[in-house]
Image: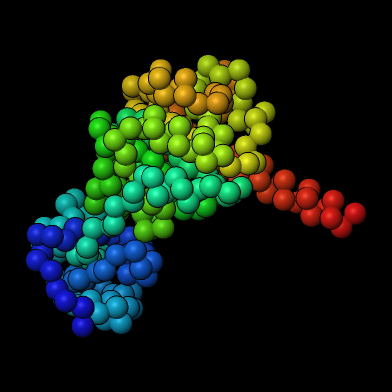
């Protein structure tokens, strides 16, 4: 049995997919799973999984669950768990050296936990190496963000740094090309080669990208002609850009295979 910690040292993970991912991904230890009494087969399955992981299980009322997950976001499940381990920015960047598939999202002053959560969910789908954020004027990985990420927070590391500029410079030294998303860019993402080691830099809600961050990048890309980026929130813009990266990389791999067979 895993030793228990004080409850005030733990963080709540709530929502079916977020809880299941936290139990299975292995990045942190769950301590206590609260399951709504009305949950049937799904509740039994998660309870069995938690027991296998050495996590205490208790049946709870809706009122007890709302203590951890306001506004009914728990979907019947709350896991009290250790916080996700902090990721050292230098070690993260060192791990990118020599990786042709490296793909990093940089978030400049993104402050809405729903946007961070949505980007994490998308990032997990497209094999993003990590999301780099600033410790200042940026949202942290809150329980609300983890809920929206729907499991993505357990698979994509969030790297919080004192200096986004230093992280950008470090990733460039590691071999990544850095492109900032900007509606005024002369090239669209589809017109830009995004197949190699890559960093995409996205600005926060309202404020957008800081000038010094833009200048530190290798180039700018827009989503489409005509300033479409201005009408989209950062999570939607990020999802479109990541899809384009995936499309280009898939096409490049298929071309390489055809050349080998030809």
Please state the horizontal and vertical placement of residue 160, each as a whole percent of the image. 31, 42
- Left-right relation of 190 to 86: right
Q: Quadrant of residue 189?
A: top right
Please state the horizontal and vertical placement of residue 199, each as a whole percent of the image. 51, 37
- Left-right relation of 252 to 19: right
Q: Is residue 185 above or below residue 147?
A: above
Q: Is residue 130 above or below residue 84?
A: above
Count the marks: how many?
0
Query: Residue 235 or 70: which is nearer the viewer?
Result: 235
Q: What residue lies at 41% left-to-right and 53% top-to-bottom?
A: 156
Which quarter shows the C terminus? bottom right
Please state the horizontal and vertical placement of residue 247, each as a whole percent of the image. 65, 44
Query: Residue 68 or 171: which is nearer the viewer?
Result: 171
Q: What residue lies at 28% left-to-right and 57% top-to-bottom?
A: 84
Q: What residue lies at 10% left-to-right and 64% top-to-bottom?
A: 7
Which quarter shows the N terminus? bottom left
Residue 229 visible somewhere in the drawing: no
Q: Is residue 59 above or below residue 170?
A: below
Query: Residue 85 or 11: which is nearer the viewer?
Result: 85
Query: Residue 183 or 8: which is nearer the viewer?
Result: 8
Of all residues, the one furthest to the right in this rendering is 262
- Left-right relation of 52 to 106: left
Residue 45 visible somewhere in the drawing: yes
């Amino acid at each position: 049995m895993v030793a228990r910690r004080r409850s005030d040292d733990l963080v709540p993970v709530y929502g079916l997919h977020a809880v299941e991912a936290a139990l299975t991904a292995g990045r942190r230890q769950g301590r206590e799973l609260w399951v709504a009494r009305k949950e049937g087969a799904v509740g039994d399955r998660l309870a069995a999984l938690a027991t296998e992981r050495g996590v205490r299980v208790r049946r709870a009322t809706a009122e007890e669950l709302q203590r951890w997950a306001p506004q009914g976001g728990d979907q019947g499940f709350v896991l009290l768990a250790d916080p996700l381990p902090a990721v050292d920015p230098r070690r993260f960047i060192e791990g990118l050296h020599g990786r042709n598939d490296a793909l990093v999202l940089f978030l400049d002053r993104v402050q809405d936990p729903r946007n961070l959560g949505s980007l994490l969910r998308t990032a997990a789908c497209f094999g993003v190496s990590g999301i780099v954020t600033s410790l200042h004027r940026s949202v942290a990985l809150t329980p609300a963000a983890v809920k929206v990420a729907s499991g993505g927070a357990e698979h994509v590391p969030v790297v919080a740094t004192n200096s986004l500029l230093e992280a950008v410079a470090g990733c460039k030294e590691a071999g990544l090309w850095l492109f900032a998303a900007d509606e005024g860019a002369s090239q669209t993402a589809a017109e830009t080669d995004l197949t190699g080691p890559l960093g995409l830099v996205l600005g926060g809600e309202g404020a957008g990208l800081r000038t010094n961050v833009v200048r530190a990048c290798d180039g700018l890309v827009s989503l489409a002609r005509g300033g479409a980026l201005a009408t989209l929130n950062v999570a939607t813009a990020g999802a479109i850009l990541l899809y384009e990266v995936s499309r280009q990389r898939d096409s490049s791999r298929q071309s390489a295979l055809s050349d080998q067979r030809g």
